[in-house]
Image (spheres, helix red, strand yellow):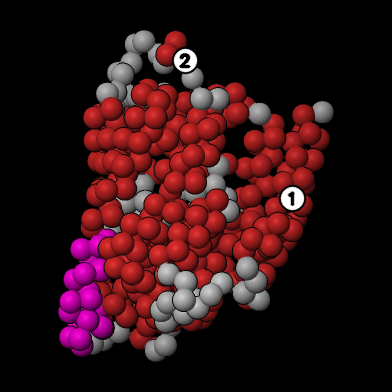
Amino acid sequence: MSAADVPQDRPHPSVKELFLGFFGISVVGFGGVIPWARWMLVERRRWLTPIEFNEIMALAQTLPGGNILNMAVILGHRYHGFAGALAGVLGLILGPFGIVILMAMFFERFQDLPGIQGALHGISAAAIGLIVALAVKMILTLKGEWIGLGFAAAAFVCVGVLRLPLLPTLGVLAPLSVAYAWFRLVRAAL
Amino acid sequence: MSAEEEPLGQLAREFALLGIIAFGGVNTILPEMQRQAVEAHGWMSNTQFTQLFAIAQAAPGPNFMIVTLVGWQVAGILGALTATLALIVPTFALAYAVAGAWRRFSQARWRKALQAGFIPLTVGLVAAGAFVLSTSTLATWQQGLAMASTFLLVMFTRIHPLIPLAVAGVLGYLGVV
């Protein structure tokens, strides 16, 4: 990306600001950081227009790995190349890394207390409730799309029920599902 | 793989591969991570894995912090660093390689097909993760009730997800769950 691609009328974050921006996103974002990222990048700091946010997010979602991580790389690269990408990613990781390690040390230190074991059983049950709700909400977005639901069911059965390894499962299902999506895009463009 | 292989090497290899195949975000690799950590390598029990997932859910930050915790469980602070870097570095390199062309790529039909094609697979894999954690961990009717209450609250109200986590934690501490 050339510097000319960066809009002149909006803030131009420094490497330090990129680090602090993504640090701020990561330490307040509970249960996923994307809504915070949008608020911080588009509304508060105005580094991105809403359309730019959507375009970068689309690419970040297409790439493998954490969506917000890909976004930090693309945005950091836009302003300061490698140093910017590194600053964005480190800002995103350092805070949560320290926090989860401290939490794990706490539970390890006190694991012999019956109350702590009970607390872990409690939050485990609630955390399962959260991911089941996420799964159901995602399934509902495929309502009426029978072929899409078929691909979802195939991935679910292979990985969840049969416990097949993910790599060969994706190796078979992904080309079929992407080819079907391509066919639909081409047909819609006609 | 040899039995004497260093756990750090195993962590690095498993998480580098997991990161590269995590199309649709890190939630999609949860069931595979569980299979690796519990069944393939025997690093921990089903219950321990779900507890790490729960701690990651209760912490702020991106939803891949479970990776850091699995590394921590296997080999302490070095394990945490190894697992986290192994997940990040390859995906960083890939995102960096295409970053300069994001505007061109974002409109390309092949990119749209790639993204649309992975959506149903992402849905199926997140459902698989939910299924694996539920069936491997829930042991008592009290846990089932805590799980079901959280599910219903999150589905049908706009409650902040930390609230049911905190309530279930307190109830567990008191010996109710």
Where residue B139 sits: x, y (%)? 42, 88
Magenta residues: mostly which secondary structure? helix
Q: Which residues are the magenta region?
A: A100-119
Amino acid of disc 1: Pro
User: How far apart are the alpha carbons under marks 2 and 1?
Assistant: 34 Å
Magenta-drawn stretch contains A114? yes
Relative to residue B106, is residue B137 depicted above or below? below
Where residue A91 sits: x, y (%)? 28, 41
Where residue A118 sits: x, y (%)? 26, 83
Please report the residue visible at 54 percent of the width from the left and 31 percent of the height from the top.
Answer: B98
Report whether residue B85 is seen: yes
Please report the residue visible at 42 percent of the width from the left and 43 percent of the height from the top.
Answer: A69
Q: Is residue A43 left or right of residue A176?
A: left
Q: Is residue A69 left or right of residue A87?
A: right
Where residue B33 sits: x, y (%)? 50, 67
- Mark 2 = which residue? A2
Amino acid of disc 2: Ser
- Mark 1 = which residue? A175
Please report the residue visible at 31 percent of the width from the left and 73 percent of the height from the top.
Answer: A123
Which picture quadrant has residue A163? bottom right
Q: Chain of mark 2?
A: A
2 vs 1, front mark: 2
Magenta-drawn stretch contains A88? no
Q: Give neighbour class at mark 1: few <14, some 14-19, many 20+ (Cα, 10 Å).
A: some
Relative to residue A180, is residue A170 depicted above or below? below
